[in-house]
Amino acid sequence: MPPASPISAADPEPALWLSRYGDELFRFARHRVASATVAEELVQETFVSALGALASFRQEASERTWLFVILRRKLVDYYRQQARSPLVPLPGAGDEAGHGPHFESDGRAHWQKGQEPREWAAVDTELERRELAQQLLRCQDQLPPQQQAVFNLRYVQEVSSEEICQELGITASNYWVIIHRSKLQLRKCLEKHWFSAS
């Protein structure tokens, strides 16, 4: 009788998922959503979905890669749900054509005198870059849910604008309004909490 063949190293081991991949999955999710609680829930949903799909895991990719693919899908679902929030007007945010209190009314999207964005100081050290990244994440957390969703899909997940519009069921015009408002709010937040203290 031939000896039993050993279990392949690629075989999924659900009992070890949390210890092997939990922290890494959590960090990945946390940098893409507004709160640690949401990140934890997304990781839990990832594990539950993976357990449900265990029979279909073909080992064409590593267990780790497979779990990250599932988490990315969970993030897109989360962003889609957030993007269903109504578009909340922001004071002074203007619109996609560049109109609003910061811009001249000549239709050419020029900044009003004294309203131009000021130059930011260079971020030189690794510590400064890490601190700036943390502050940017805190500023992103303050965006309304719809803006968070669209901003994260575009600039964190690097999804194209066309895919975002299709995925979230929004028009191109609405997309540009959301992106414009997000950038203005993030700039204002960074100037208040980071660059003014530099």
Image: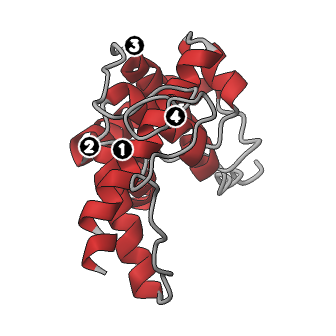
Looking at the image, is 62 positioned above or below residue 33? below
Q: Is residue 173 left or right of residue 121?
A: right
Structural crowding at the residue carrying mark 3, measured as other residues with C-alpha within 10 Å and reported as few (<14), some (14–19) or many (≥20)? some
Q: Nearer the viewer, mark 4 or mark 3?
A: 4
Disc 3/disc 1 C-alpha distance (Å): 20 Å
Please report the residue visible at 60 percent of the width from the left and 12 percent of the height from the top: 171
**Is there any visible trace of residue 79 in the rendered image?**
yes
Q: Is residue 130 left or right of residue 191?
A: right
Colouring chosen for the image of the structure: secondary structure
Return the disc, 1 or 4, that comes first in the chain's sequence: 4
Pointer 2 and pointer 4: residues touching (CB < 8 Å)? no
Q: Amino acid at mark 2?
A: Gln
Disc 4/disc 3 C-alpha distance (Å): 15 Å
Disc 2/disc 4 C-alpha distance (Å): 15 Å
In front: 139, or 107? 107
Q: Nearer the viewer, mark 3 or mark 1?
A: 1
Residue annotated with mark 3: 84
Residue annotated with mark 2: 142
Q: Amino acid at mark 3?
A: Arg
Return the disc, 2 or 4, that comes first in the chain's sequence: 2
Q: Position of residue 90 (x, y in %)?
A: 30, 29
Q: Which mark is residue 185?
A: 1
Q: Which mark is residue 179?
A: 4
